[in-house]
Amino acid sequence: MLYGLIDSAFPIAAAMAAVAGIVRGFAGFGSAMLLVPSLSALYGPQVAIPMLAAMELAVGGQLLPKAIKRAEPRTVGFLSAGALIGIPLGAVLLVLVPAAPMRWAISALILVAVALLALGVGRKGPAKRNGTIFTGGLSGLTTGATGMGGPPVVIYFLAGTDAAASIRATLICFFIFTTVWQGAVYIANGLLTWEVAAKGALLYPVFALGAVAGARLFTGSKENTYRRVALALVAAVAVVSVLV
């Protein structure tokens, strides 16, 4: 299995990893949108999603030092509390429920939320504790089940008035926590093995270089640009999940 990536499909997988890294470095999320469908086509979701978790943990650590200075610790804590419950439940769904119907249901909910945001429906006032915990739980559920935990929490932030730098930094810190917990749950369930992690290691260098490039793009971007790109990425997650 370890040599499965080193074949005629490897250049395509590496190119997708580079693009996904740029997206991750710029937005603080979104790499799973590109890599889960492509890697699942090669190895199946029960290998691809744990493999991506290993890659995400490494690149998240790469982005963490700068992000931790701008993140909201209280918000990260509430989101993480919810994810503690959501991720194990999602991992059970990954094992027991067919992938396609689960993706379609999640995609439908995401598209409804994106449409509401486009119509101007938003959250009034600062984020509340209970709503933030619930959002973290929902993000954890979709992380464990599909590897794509970004949409629920990104939509929650975009519905408010938080600054782009704060949103991105909080997402990076939160996803470090969820990836560590996700990896532990996958190991306990026999999904993340040394062989699967080694597959991710083959793609990590180009993924990491993409993340560096994406972080530099964010540094020169405007507030509205980040919010538009983030909303477009969330919508694209939903569409891609339906089509693959």
Image (cartoon, helix red, strand yellow):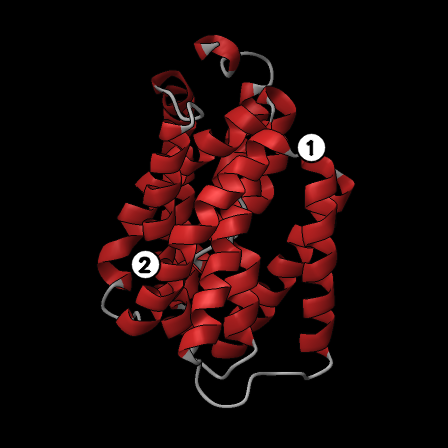
Q: Front-most of 66 and 50? A: 50
Q: Is residue 135 above or below residue 93?
A: below
Badge number at residue 173: 2
* Dot 2: element: helix
Residue 39 vs residue 15, the one in the foreground: 39
Q: Position of residue 131 (x, y in %)?
A: 48, 74
Q: Badge 1 is on which residue?
A: 98
| Residue 228 located left or right of residue 128 | right
Q: For the C terminus, which image quadrant?
A: top right
Q: Is residue 61 left or right of residue 48?
A: left
Question: x, y (%) of residue 99?
Answer: 67, 35
- Is residue 19 visible in the rendered image? The answer is no
Residue occupying the point 32% across, 58% down = 173
Whole-percent x, y for residue 183 in the image: 37, 36
10 Å neighbourhood of mark 2: few (<14), some, or many (≥20)?
A: many
Q: Secondary structure at mark 1?
A: loop
Q: Are marks 1 and 2 in contact (CB under 8 Å)?
A: no
Residue shown at the point (67%, 52%) measured from the top left: 106
Q: In the current view of this chain or complex, which residue is farthest to the bottom?
A: 125
Q: Nearer the viewer, mark 1 or mark 2?
A: 1
Q: Which of the marked residues, 1 or 2, is nearer the chain's N terminus?
A: 1
Residue shown at 52%/12% (left/top)? Answer: 4
Question: Separation of disc 1 and disc 2 at Cα?
Answer: 30 Å
The amino acid pointed to by label 1 is Pro
Which residue is at a point 68% across and 68% down the rendered structure image? 114
Q: Is residue 33 above or below residue 43?
A: below
Say which amino acid is labelled 2: Cys
